[in-house]
Amino acid sequence: MEAALKGYFGYSTFRPYQREIIQKVLDGRDCLVVMATGSGKSICYQIPPLVTKKTAVVVSPLLSLMQDQVMSLKQKGVKSEYLGSTQTNSSVSNEAEKGTFDVLYMTPEKAISLPSRFWSNLQASGICLLAVDEAHCISEWGHDFRTEYKQLHSLRNLLVGVPFVALTATATERVRQDISTSLVLCSPHVVVGSFDRHNLFYGVKTCNRSMSFISELVKDVSKRSDVGESTIIYCTTIRDTEQVHEALVTSGIKTGIYHGQMGSRAREESHRSFIRDEVLVMVATIAFGMGIDKPDVRCVIHYGCPKSLESYYQESGRCGRDGLPSICWLYYQRSDITKADFYCSEAKNETQRKAIMDSFMAAQKYCLLATCRRRFLLQYFGEEWNIDCGNCDNCTAVKNERDLSKEVFLLLSCIKSCGGRWGLNLPIDVLRGSRAKKIVDNNYDKLQMHGRGKDYSSNWWKALGGLLIAHDNSIAVFSLAKEESITERFHLNASKDYLKETVRDTFRFVSPKGVK
Ligand code: ADP
Ligand code: ZN
């Protein structure tokens, strides 16, 4: 094992868990490996073939990812090839079944469509493992479900006695269970490494208006590119991608763009110029991602709330792979809550819709957090992590908390008194003492809370409403965003029962469609 690590990869020691996993695979045991991006999972399936002189088959979701890996393995003297779904040339698969390759990559589509003759021939030549990379794609509860992954279990019957190794960087308990069940893993050796990426700083910037937000972003990015550091900016939609790209280019920053509606040539070109440091800034949809093995990205910015913490963790994790301090900013707008509908539109059934909704609400919570963000993330992924990290915006900011129970009660009872039909804006106008026609016509100016909320701006009240929705009534400490991304922190005494009651009654109509 050591000889292979040194001889082919040039490393003299294994990273945590690598040796243990390789040993289990050599013993013929199934494994489920959950380790952070950049922790060195690939070596776990690349070394066994070099030790056993048998082929390792690796199922991987993306062609570009496989191409990169194959190229880099070939350079190291490891015999490697890939089988894509659309390949008609059968010479690779003819070679493969003779056991020519150490590491043979294939897409899941290919894996399930190869004839059983292929597998029996390969088994006769020698196969040491079947690895399923990005295994969270198996689960509908994961953030990147792919149908073909679900069918991989059919390989189980064709490859009797071959250890299966499922690998992923992000998996909650539920997803882990799904992976194990779906691949019919046989009492797998489970390794869950720490997800902590200690060199990454986490932070959220909050803002109301997208224009001032973009100028803040431009400032942020230009600071970094001036000193030669790379940044990736992830946007939710292609429209945002284009808008942010244009703003950066206009202010003279050389910026690449990458999204699914570009041709594959243009995308490859864009990818390459970023890897080669010809452009330091890349604005992209999440289509830009898996397989970017650029070690020195210094910052990942998410422009808009991501659809889940799983995907956030994976995407933001693309900076600082070299272990040096790097930054993950999330630019959040209160109106991001409306993205729920956008994300839910991908759902094919009720289970999926519920899963997408749950994941999205967790991401919202992260955005509005006033406590340690790392702690929240790691606990979300099931780790016992009970200390504040000292390396996120909330840990480093000066605390400024106060009890907001009174204001919350005022807002909620006003929504209720207005009959709960108006959303947020009208009740806020009532609180602020408006005598607009609609208000007078409905006698809302006679309510006792009319004008009682004059001390706060209407944006302030909207922020409070947004926070309550995002936190569902269960969380005690809120951070409240003011305009221009200054964050103040407040405290809500959630132990007061009257609040809980009112919150529960009120949410249905201030929430966008689908949020309970
Ligand atoms: P993952 O698949 O978990 O995201 P990779 O397998 O791509 O991570 O590994 C990340 C980086 O760490 C790669 O550049 C790899 O060469 C390097 N690496 C892996 N194992 C070791 C090791 N034992 N010693 C030093 N570097 C390693
Ligand atoms: Zn922290």
Image (spheres, grey):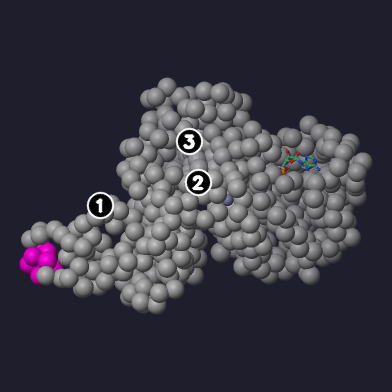
Q: Quadrant of ligand 1?
A: top right
CA gap between label 3 and label 1 equals: 34 Å
Residue at label 1?
A: 457
Q: Nearer the viewer, mark 3 or mark 1?
A: 1
**Residue 215 lies within the magenta run:** no
> Mark 1 or mark 2: which comes first in sequence?
2
* Mark 1: C-beta under 8 Å from nearest atom of ligand 2: no
Numbered disc 2: secondary structure: loop
Does 303 appear above or below 119? above
Numbered disc total = 3
What's the mark number on residue 283? Answer: 3
Q: x%, y% of residue 45?
A: 79, 50
Q: Amino acid at mark 3?
A: Val
- Point 62% across, 50% down: residue: 389
Quadrant of the image containing the C terminus: bottom left
- Of 273 and 310, nearer the camera is 310
What's the mark number on residue 397? Answer: 2
Is 58 left or right of 19, judged from the image as shown?
left
> Mark 3 or mark 1: which comes first in sequence?
3
> Mark 2 or mark 3: which comes first in sequence?
3
- Point 35% across, 42% down: residue: 484
Q: Residues within 10 Å of mark 3 (few under 14, many from 20)?
A: many
> Looking at the magenta stretch, what is its main secondary structure?
helix
The residue segment tinted magenta is 438-445
CA gap between label 1 and label 2 equals: 24 Å
Q: Residues within 10 Å of mark 1 (few under 14, many from 20)?
A: some
Q: Locate residue 461: give its quadrant.
A: bottom left
Q: Amino acid at mark 1?
A: Ser
Does 352 appear above or below 3? below
CA gap between label 2 and label 3 equals: 28 Å
Q: x%, y% of residue 274?
A: 57, 29
